[in-house]
Image (cartoon, grey):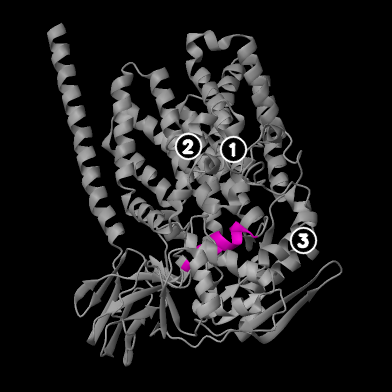
Amino acid sequence: MLKSLKIIKINLTTLIFIAYILFVFCYFFYNKVVFTPDFGQSDAYYINYMYKHFIWKNLHSFRLPFWTDQLQNGFPLLGESQSGLLYLPNLLLLSIPDFYLGYSLIYVFIVCTTAIGIYFLLKELNIDNKLSLIIALNFPLGFAFSLKWVHLNSIESYCLIPITSFSLIKLLKNKDLKWFLISTVLIQQSVFTGHIPASFISIFTVGFFITIFVVTNSKNFVKDLIIVYLNLIAGMWLTLPHILPVIKYLQFTGKLTTIDYNYAVSFPFTPKNLIEFILPFANGNPKNGSYPVFNSTFWSTFWENGSYIGYIFSVLSLTTILKFIISLEFLKKDTKLATYNLGGIVFFLLLALGKYSPLYFLFNLPPFIFFRTPGRYLIPTVFFLTLFTAIILNKTINKNRLLKLLILILFVINLFILTIQIKNYHLLISKDKIQTTPEILKYIPKQAKIASLDMPKEWNKVFKTNGWQSDLETSAYLFFRNYIYANSSLIYDLRDYTINSGGLKPIKTVYLESILTTLVNSNDCEQLSKYLQIINVDYFISSSNLNCLNHIKTFNFENNKYIFTIHLYKTKNNKDIVYVPDKIKTAIYFEDLNQIISDQFTDKIAILELENLNKDIINKIDYIKVISNTDTYLEFKTKNNHPGYVIIDKLLTPEWDIFVNSNKSNFVEANLIQSAIYLPSGENTVKIVYTNKYFITGIAAGLTGFIITLMLYKFFFSRTRYYKGVFKALSK
């Protein structure tokens, strides 16, 4: 009888989770796309959607896209991209033939993995089954998680915090190799999501929690901590196939030089934001344009500041904290775990407050100095707040069935409030509206290189005052897809001179965006035309009316509230993937480059990033024939009577190998986003190959490190058990 009741109980829990999964899928994601805008643009659309669609397209051609020429004139997707290229759930779900179904299921997977992880973790902490279940259903819909649907890769990492913590507890209790391997893979996958700051916070949170658990529960905490940290080290070894390309790309971009205290505390969570734990829209709502526009020094974005867990959940949490402190329960031995979790809440909340916190000095130190936006530490704050609340409520309701029923009902109400509040912020748009092709693409051929400006500026005219509160704003934002804003090239088979990334794009690309914007705003049409020709752009898209470019078409948008115009221009570019420059100059500084373009411009000028040029260069190459040209391989032949340079219209990185007549050679950066190769006189065969060398090195080094760590783990256990047996025998 008891067994049958247990089966019914387990099945009921399972049925509730199944119903929850179906509800989340149907209510939020079925036939819908997360299209939530923000200041300037939507990361949900222009990062998440674009990258995932690109992966889906490549997976169905049976390849992994480690490199693409469609972004930034050449971009390594493992280098900085938030594509989540190696994340197993992405690979599995994007293998589904229907992209929109697979993409929606990624969101469902995140919500449900978070809920299931919290449920099993609370159960492992001996929390009542019903209380564990209802808290687990609430947790992933809290704003700390659900607002970050706009930044998919970060929550792909955050969602693994509870399940990884659970697996490490199982490892400590069972000392089983199976749980060691499961935990290792979860740690690896947390990094493979592609959002390094989120991965750091996730692993740091797991390490912090499991240390608390060991200290409060273990009789031999030194041994158990060694087990845990060996597991974390093993997992980190397996992340090297992603970490090594990231480090190398950071060196290449020059962005490491911009990391300092001011960077680390930028986009802050302020004391004024604390009210949002209870009243999510107390400072305004971006959806209606009432939330203050972010400022990297004084204010962050709404979705980064998300901390709301529901009115009822917030009040219950605050009540349990006050009761715990006022009644001095933290002094009791049997409340150690709750006390340490309360410490976790305080520690991570102070980290979230960044420069407004007494812990501000930590952001001058590694690893905190490497990552901006302190508000991201709200994720572990809410995680520990949830655990603390569950522990205290569990103790409170154990002896009072009526109170237990009341608490469960309150959490059910809280769950419904959260589902309503999510839609008070997010814009979930019909996939049919996204599937329509922007009209401008009728006039741009496939594989053309584009440069697009003004979309963020034009959208902000709407966003700053009205957000996206009605169809009038949404239709304007849909019209702005005609700008083919950065990353759109991935789904429309175009090439773009820039990229919309997580902020770690090369300094030269940032400068190029800045100078083009300045030239358009100042109406310096002549200099603008020169820059567009130098970087080999075919089509230019802007809201400005420019007389110096060949105007192709004007696209107009008008409704009862807004009027917008987009212009499409054809440039004078006529250069191929490989071409011979008719003039070669050198420049190290942007000012020098700008001066050369102003005073010495020719259609095929090459400005090399060198201090000096060999005086013997006579740049006359008589013959070029391209043999093969793909994203990851370029081969061509030349014939020249004198040494000289050819320009490759591709931004090469250190992962490329160059062979001139089978001899390894080097490239020189040229024209900001192109590359130059020096050729000796005579007939030359040039092969340029993307080797993915740091990914391959990462696999070899990672597996080696993992095996060594695994051997240490096994050795440690065998020695521990041996000495334990010896001591036991001697005691007898």
Query: Is residue 437 in view?
Result: no
C-alpha span from label 2 to label 1: 11 Å
The answer to whether the residue labelled 2 contacts the one labelled 1, judged by CB atoms less than 8 Å apart, is yes
Q: Amino acid at mark 2?
A: Pro
Q: Viewed as shown, does residue 242 lie left or right of 528? A: left
C-alpha span from label 3 to label 1: 33 Å
User: Badge 1, how many Cα within 10 Å: few under 14, some, many 20+?
Assistant: many
Q: Is residue 508 magenta?
A: no
What number is the disc on residue 415?
none
Mark 3: secondary structure: helix
Mark 1: secondary structure: helix
State the residue position of label 1. 139
Picture layout, residue 18 above or below residue 635: above
Residue with the most extreme bottom position: 622
State the residue position of label 2. 162
Mark 2: secondary structure: helix
Query: Is residue 711 in view?
Result: yes
State the residue position of label 3. 462
Q: Position of residue 128 (x, y in %)?
A: 54, 25
Q: Amino acid at mark 1?
A: Phe
Query: Which sits earlier in the primary sequence, circle 3 or circle 1?
Result: 1
In magenta, the rendered stretch is 41-54
Q: Viewed as shown, does residue 95 lie left or right of 464? A: left
The answer to whether the residue labelled 2 contacts the one labelled 3, judged by CB atoms less than 8 Å apart, is no
The answer to whether the residue labelled 3 contacts the one labelled 1, judged by CB atoms less than 8 Å apart, is no
Which quadrant is the C terminus positioned in?
top left
Of 219 and 234, which appears nearest the observer? 234
Identified at 19% across, 37% down, the residue is 711
Identified at 48% across, 24% down, the residue is 126
Q: Nearer the viewer, mark 3 or mark 1?
A: 3
Q: Position of residue 564 (x, y in %)?
A: 77, 72
